[in-house]
Image (tube, helix red, strand yellow):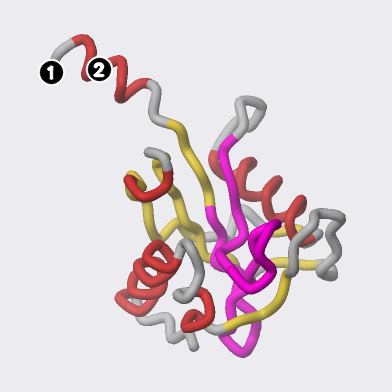
Amino acid sequence: MTEDEKQKIGQIKHSVTAIILNDKNQVLGVSRKDDHEDFGLVGGKVDKGDISLETAIAREVMEETGLTINTDTMVQILSMHKVMSNGYMGHTYVIRDWSGEINTNEPHVVKWLTFADMEKGSFGDWNRIAKESLQSIGVNVI
């Protein structure tokens, strides 16, 4: 591996997404800020101040939904370099242990959806892969 290749690998940016499921196996979706019909998973970029991926996902979930998650019980089901998303390494977690009420000051819509709804959005490919990862481990989602 060349020094240039090593440097590029060291500069990979990271993002996190959460598959937050309710008791009906619906997933919590967040709309794009500029398109309230385009839904994706809760999440975002890992900030320099985040000490781990777990703190990043807890922060993103709180910011975007107002919910508190238990990072001790969440399970990472997918990590992949996302060519389709400006070269971020994406990390997706399944979260069933959460508390609170949906409440956010951010300019988007937050609501319970099916994965079919999530696959229609601009991150549809990622959401489809996340759903397939869940199904491969025996989690049935709608």
Q: Position of residue 106 (x, y in %)?
A: 80, 54
Residue kind at label 2, given as amino acid type: Lys
Say which mark, if any, is on residue 6.
Answer: 2
Residue at screen point 57% across, 41% down: 45
- Most distant residue in the front direction: 34
Image quarter of residue 69: bottom right
| Residue 136 on the magenta segment | no
Residue at 40% in and 62% down? 126
Residue placed most toward the observer, 59 or 89: 89
Q: Is residue 36 magenta?
A: yes
| Image quarter of residue 51 | top right
Q: Position of residue 72 (x, y in %)?
A: 60, 54
- Is label 2 in a helix, a strand or a loop? helix
The stretch of residues the image draws in magenta is: 17-46
Q: Quadrant of the N terminus?
A: top left
Q: Give the x, y percent position of residue 16.
A: 53, 48
Image mark for residue 126:
none
Badge 1: how crowded within 10 Å, few (<14), some, or many (20+)? few
Q: Is residue 74 left or right of residue 58?
A: left
Residue at the far left: name it.
Answer: 1
Residue at image x 81%, y 69%? 102
Q: Is residue 72 above or below residue 11?
A: below
From this view, report whether residue 110 is shown above or below residue 93: below
Q: Main secondary structure of the magenta part?
A: strand
